[in-house]
Image (cartoon, grey):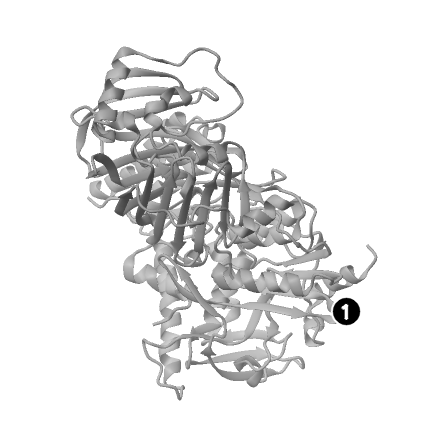
């Protein structure tokens, strides 16, 4: 019997949301980015015993045996971002250096370069359409937190509570089913809840349902599947992330990941056009 | 091969059963709006009793429509409609329908309960109608090839006539003839009435547009049909008949030349010529026209240079007439050069399957050295999608005065899918509201000064809409 076919949903207009969607998923499979600033929790963060077991297993599986040494100082990632609905593939380069900054650049055919970064405490973005911009508020916090490459070890900074929420079988984008341990995470900033699904066998994060801060103070839901984990010098990096937010979908694939690479002078400095904005 | 986006989309209908017809490729970066939706083409579909198989397909189609709206509409309350009750009321009508029309009417009744445009069923026969229209264009092109000296082939480039036409008082008037264009060389003048094109009476095209009677206003629908006939492969010759300024019939053979615009595409959108025009009018007034929001790498630097060149001008005119939309981020990107404080341009409202509704604000971020003088924006019924978003955005923040006629009202992102029974199903997946809370859906941007071309004005060489804008800029108002 003939089925409904031909879905042509077009979302290039929302490319501004692409980077936040990507950045909602820590490169090192760390916490999601459910953050606001309206409320500040006062009680000490808590994690129940079952959640702790899942969490520790994840850290051991993804961050190597000697994670506590926090030996990864920077990561340089090269890859692509695909918007399937439009058949648009953008080349992407990311550099994240602990305590120094971050720089994300994408060259999107037909749209030109999109850049976003953090230098010290200043988050910024620049693209052909919006021009240079200092990123503020929750969106800036979200970017700055990316500099914490070992966020999972510092979960108390980000979550008021993490609790075990049972086991669940989930279906991955390739239609395979896996058994997962489900954790519910409550943001320390505003109490926003995110849900993370850890592969019961491997301990690795498989799916995260969270909320992403976007320009203008908006919040956007995000569901991300982290797949194709590969061992890079003892840490497990998800080389493929499939994110969706409402009807939008993007696929990030890395082709190369370098750890503790040399950072060139000025590579993470603020662009001149951002400096000019700060002088105003 | 034609690379005209409209004709291409029409021919795509026949070749790939992709139902993104009429203006999809132009609008898909803002979200595309199909042509027919909440009302349907009156058809003469078979009225005989349905077979069991056909009835099952109609029921399956109903279920698909019902579930799609339930799962994908941006408003989880579905505009306050009791969706389960709607199913209980209407599914039996589909199950008991004795004809396709009866089944279709029941599905349309289901969608009608939403009381929103961009939701509707397009009868399979409508596709046949559009296929015929598409075929006519192809036939015209093929037949005119014999009249052409050029050896046009599948590698030919998009061609252009160098004139615009608008439906005014139920006649298509030539509103613009570009200097040194094929239209000018053929002796065509503004104010002439387009009587027939490619062997088809324009009146019948207007009638066709009125017959389709979809979410698109007839003048916009007809305008797009005529637009498609005024474009073709470079080197092709077409025949046209006009009524000139003396009410005499003029037969014209016009050969398309390669479009002078920038070729731009993105993703699956094939390259199309984009016209950008930056000029200085009398009294130093700046004039900027853009036919589509594409190729930001070329268009925006041109626009920025235009702003810089006219920083001391008493005013600038942004001409959005006949702009078919495009990359939405280019709209705030242009507005950013006209404002001095941050703000909101509008909001996209969607729904996530797991997290529910959410909104994406489109923010304005002023540029350094922005323009501070008067801004006039020109619009018409062929200002579509992002052109509406830009004009409404400027109007809402009080930064521009808008001249012309109401825009198309086609700013909702929507899609069309094919149902199991062969009908088309159009639905919007997001809502867009301006910063003032005004929905552009169906409404369009309303001008501050409602003014249109007149035949006499055009015959006298006047663009009365532009004149009104420049008069305002030159006034003390």
Q: Position of residue B475 (x, y in %)?
A: 82, 60
Badge 1 crowding class, 10 Å Cα cut-off, few under 14, some 14 to 19, many 20 or more, is few
The image quadrant of residue B425 is: top left
Question: Residue B441, can we see it?
Answer: no
Q: Which residue is mark 1?
A: B283
Tell me where residue B247 appears, x and y as whole percent. Answer: 65, 80
Vertically, is A171 above or below B126? above
* Residue lying at 32% horizontally and 31% vertically, measured from the top left: B92
Side of A234 where B319 appears, left or right: right
Q: Residue furthest right?
A: B476
Say left or right for A34 vs A130: left
* Image: B245 above or below A113: below
Task: Out of B208 and A172, give the one closest to the viewer.
Answer: A172
Chain to which mark 1 belongs? B
Res A225 → quadrant? top left
Using the rendered image of the protein, determine whether residue B332 is visible from the camera's viewpoint. yes
Residue B28, image x, y percentages: 43, 53
On-image quarter of the N terminus of chain B:
bottom left
Depth check, front residue: B4 or A236 = A236
For numbered disc 1, what is the local secondary structure? Answer: helix
């Amino acid at each position: 019997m003939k089925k409904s076919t031909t879905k042509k949903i077009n979302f290039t207009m929302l490319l501004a949301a692409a980077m936040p969607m990507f950045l909602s998923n820590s490169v090192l499979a760390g916490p999601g980015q459910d953050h606001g600033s309206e409320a500040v929790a006062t009680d000490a963060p808590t994690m129940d015993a079952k959640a702790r077991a899942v969490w520790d297993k994840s850290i051991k599986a993804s961050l190597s045996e000697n994670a506590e040494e926090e030996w990864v100082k920077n990561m340089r990632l090269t890859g692509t971002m695909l918007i399937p609905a439009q058949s648009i593939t953008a080349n992407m380069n990311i550099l994240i250096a602990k305590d120094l900054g971050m720089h994300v650049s994408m060259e999107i055919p037909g749209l030109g370069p999109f850049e976003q970064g953090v230098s010290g405490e200043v988050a910024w973005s620049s693209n052909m359409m919006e021009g240079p911009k200092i990123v503020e508020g929750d969106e800036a916090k979200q970017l700055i937190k990316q500099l914490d490459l070992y966020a999972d070890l510092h979960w108390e900074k980000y979550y008021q509570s993490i609790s075990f929420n049972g086991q669940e079988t989930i279906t991955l984008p390739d239609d395979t089913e896996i058994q997962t341990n489900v954790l519910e995470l409550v943001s320390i900033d505003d109490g926003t809840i995110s849900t993370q699904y850890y592969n019961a066998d491997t301990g690795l994060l498989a799916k995260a349902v969270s909320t992403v801060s976007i320009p203008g103070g908006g919040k956007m839901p995000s569901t991300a599947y982290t797949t194709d984990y590969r061992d890079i010098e003892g840490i497990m990096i998800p080389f493929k992330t499939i994110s969706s937010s409402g009807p939008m979908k993007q696929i990030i694939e890395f082709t190369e990941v370098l750890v503790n690479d040399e950072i060139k002078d000025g590579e993470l400095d603020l662009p001149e056009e951002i400096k000019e904005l700060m002088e105003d | 091969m034609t690379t005209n986006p409209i004709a291409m989309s029409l021919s795509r209908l026949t070749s790939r059963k992709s139902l993104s017809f009429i203006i999809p490729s132009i609008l898909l970066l803002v979200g595309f709006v199909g042509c027919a939706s909440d009302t349907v083409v009156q058809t003469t579909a078979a009225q005989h009793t349905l077979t069991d198989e056909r009835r099952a397909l109609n029921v399956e189609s109903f279920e698909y429509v019902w579930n799609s709206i339930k799962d994908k509409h941006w408003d989880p309350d579905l505009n306050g409609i009791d969706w389960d009750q709607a199913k209980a009321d209407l599914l039996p009508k589909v199950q008991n329908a004795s004809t396709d029309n009866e089944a279709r009417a029941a599905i349309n009744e289901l969608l009608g309960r939403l009381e929103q445009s961009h939701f509707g069923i397009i009868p399979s026969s409508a596709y046949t109608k559009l296929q015929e229209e598409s075929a006519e264009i192809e036939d015209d092109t093929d037949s005119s090839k014999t009249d052409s000296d050029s050896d046009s082939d599948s590698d030919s480039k998009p061609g252009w006539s160098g004139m615009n036409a608008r439906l005014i008082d139920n006649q298509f008037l030539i509103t613009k003839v570009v200097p040194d264009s094929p239209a000018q060389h053929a002796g065509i003048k503004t104010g002439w009435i387009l009587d027939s094109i490619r062997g088809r009476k324009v009146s019948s095209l207007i009638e066709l547009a009125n017959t389709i009677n979809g979410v698109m206003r007839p003048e916009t629908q007809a305008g797009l049909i005529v637009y498609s006939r005024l474009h073709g492969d470079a080197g092709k010759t077409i025949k046209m008949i006009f009524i000139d300024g003396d009410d005499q019939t003029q037969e014209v053979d016009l050969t398309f030349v390669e479009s002078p615009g920038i070729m731009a595409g993105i993703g699956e959108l094939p390259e199309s010529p984009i016209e950008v025009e930056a000029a200085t009018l009398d009294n130093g007034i700046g004039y900027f026209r853009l036919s589509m929001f594409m190729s930001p790498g070329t268009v925006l630097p041109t626009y920025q240079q235009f702003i810089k060149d006219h920083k001391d001008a008493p005013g600038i005119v942004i001409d959005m007439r006949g702009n078919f939309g495009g990359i939405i981020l280019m709209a705030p990107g242009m507005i950013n050069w006209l404002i001095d404080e941050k703000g909101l341009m509008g909001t996209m409202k969607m729904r996530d399957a797991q997290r529910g509704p959410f909104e994406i604000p489109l923010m304005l971020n002023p540029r350094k050295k922005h323009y501070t003088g008067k801004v006039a924006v020109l619009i018409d019924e062929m200002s579509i999608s992002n052109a509406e978003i830009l004009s409404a955005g400027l109007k809402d923040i009080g930064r521009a005065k808008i001249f012309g006629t109401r825009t198309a009202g086609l700013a909702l992102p929507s899609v069309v899918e094919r149902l199991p029974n062969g009908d088309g199903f159009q639905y919007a997946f997001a809502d867009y509201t301006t910063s003032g809370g005004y929905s552009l859906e169906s409404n369009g941007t309303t001008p501050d000064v409602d003014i249109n071309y007149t035949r006499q004005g055009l015959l006298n060489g006047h663009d009365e809409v532009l004149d009104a804008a420049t008069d305002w800029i030159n006034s003390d108002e």
